[in-house]
Image: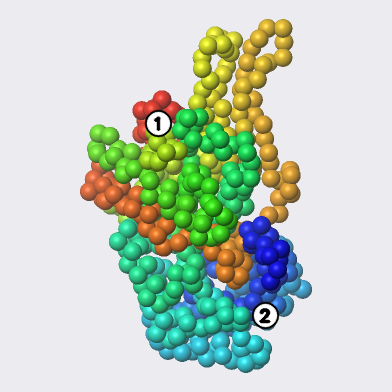
Amino acid sequence: MAQEDIRHPFLEGLSRHRGAPSTIIIIFGASGDLTRRKLIPSLYNLGTDNLLPADFLLIGCGRKNLGDDNFRQFAREAISEHARRTFDEDSWRPLAEKIFYLAGGYDDPQTYKDLAEKIEGLERSTSRQHHLLFYISTPPAVFKPILQNLGASGLSRAIGPDGHAATVIIEKPFGRDLSTARELNQIITNEFDEKQVYRIDHYLGKETVQDLLVQRFANSIFEPIWNRRFVDCVQITVAEDLGVGTRAGYYDQSGALRDMIQNHTMQLLALTAMEPPVSLDAEAIRDEKVKVLKAIQPLTLSAENADAVRGQFTEGIVGGRKVSGYMQADGVPPTSHTETYTALRLFINNWRWQGVPFYLRSGKRMARKVSEISVHFKRPPGVLFTESDKFDVAANTMVIRIQPDEGVMLLFNSKIPGLETRTQPVKMHFRYATTYGSNTPEAYERLLLDAMTGDATLFIRGDETEASWKIVTPVLDFWNDCGKRGLETYVSGSWGPLAAERLLWDYGHQWRRAGP
Ligand code: BG6
């Protein structure tokens, strides 16, 4: 291949996937919530946009005793309800013919014999070899038997066209703490080579998260000031207005720290704070993320002074509607002390960031759904515009809005027109929807296609997940020892418990009112 033909996939966008090899995706947990809400609708969107490989097949695998037809019906309903593209018979029909179902127990070796036979049968009827992509979207309790059976049956070693080794995508939760994550990594690498493993964090599939690398490294004006000399603090907010819905069974075992901070929020931090990678290669980017995660100082955790705050929502009003508290949600045990909100104060002990607090927060039932990263710059020297009644001078702030209303906002100070010199902060906005239109691909579309073509850039490496668990595991242990002690409450529809404000006051900061 000539040098000019080698283009990095990150630069080529989804259209490059027209060249993806013939693929069979095997989804374990086929009738589950994620398959219904995200995976099948994403595959449909891709099909509608002509981005699936021509020889694409899907086998749903699950414990429910369904046949191909029932599963196709399930898929059809999932698409009608959740796909970005409107349901259309002409797009659905060719996809429906490619969907199959296999019923079986995840720990039963027979399931994997049946699966291998089904794959062989499909390959015979299409007269081609396929790249096998296993998607494990089950409760974590069965990750181990699935992985071990994929190994024992030889499916993990299947080689597809052009030498494409079988690939496995693993959904979160990736362990419950550092030791279980290590154990899971060990089980995986007993059966698969790390290069075959795609640990998913759907935040990395979001356009705005990918754009973080572009904002930082394709512009020359931000990088020189992206450090301790100019930055006062960084705040990362991942707030949701929803409660736990029907997921209390899962959520009560998890809590906000495991559900959102260890993975999504920590990834945002890594991309915001990492050093420039030497290339856009998956390993180069992941090396930098691991380095910055490893530089995070252990948190201070004591009853009097903790870098971590947790809270649980009580009843309140969200979006004009009265909602009940977490303890009243169906399936939450009366003894629960699971946090639905977490805020952390972190310091990165490296040359670039020493002494700059990074504040992270995530919660359910907060005032509104918003994810953003705000970089707060140091104030200018107070020698000129100091009279507070005339000069309203705010610290410059750059806000990267991950969702919704995706965009970037820059806050700076300006003179109010008039004969007298008065100032006020003003905002400069870049909005994705205005510049690019709003029908951008779903995170799962991007990630599924990347896994089909073997591009792991937007997936988490084993050492990365362990580095992140290493930061949060002491917090989990501390909270476990405290029981209910120190568990704050916050009213649904608010911005979280008061203690989370105090986390910032210690350093003279306050949370940005996240939003437009
Ligand atoms: C999931 C969490 O990983 O992310 C959910 O398990 C959460 O609890 C969801 O609601 C949020 O994702 P998004 O893309 O809606 O911000």
Q: Position of residue 24 (x, y in %)?
A: 59, 79
Q: Which mark is residue 228?
A: none
Q: What residue is drawn where x is 54% and y is 64%?
A: 456
Q: What residue is drawn where x is 42% and y is 89%?
A: 110
**Dot 1 crowding, Cα within 10 Å, few <14, some 14–19, many 20+:** some
**Residue at label 2?**
55
**Image height check: is 464 above or below 107?**
above
Q: Earlier in the sequence, mark 2 or mark 1?
A: 2
User: In the current view of this chain or complex, which residue is farthest to the left?
Assistant: 481
Tell me which colouring the rendered structure shows: rainbow
Q: Are marks 2 and 1 in contact (CB under 8 Å)?
A: no
Q: Looking at this view, is 380 or 438 the one in front?
A: 380
- Amino acid on which the number 2 mark rests in the picture: Asp
Q: Helix or strand or loop: what does disc 2 sit on?
A: loop
Q: Position of residue 13 (x, y in %)?
A: 68, 59
**Residue at label 1?**
504
Q: Is residue 244 visible?
A: no
Q: Quadrant of the N terminus?
A: bottom right
Q: Is residue 199 visible?
A: yes
Q: Position of residue 451 (x, y in %)?
A: 57, 68
Q: Quadrant of the C terminus?
A: top right
Q: How many numbered marks does the figure carry?
A: 2
**Image height check: is 346 above or below 177?**
above
Q: Position of residue 458 (x, y in %)?
A: 54, 59
User: In the current view of this chain or complex, which residue is farthest to the top?
Assistant: 420
Residue 332 horizontal side relative to residue 120, left or right: left
Q: What residue is drawn where x is 57% and y is 55%?
A: 279
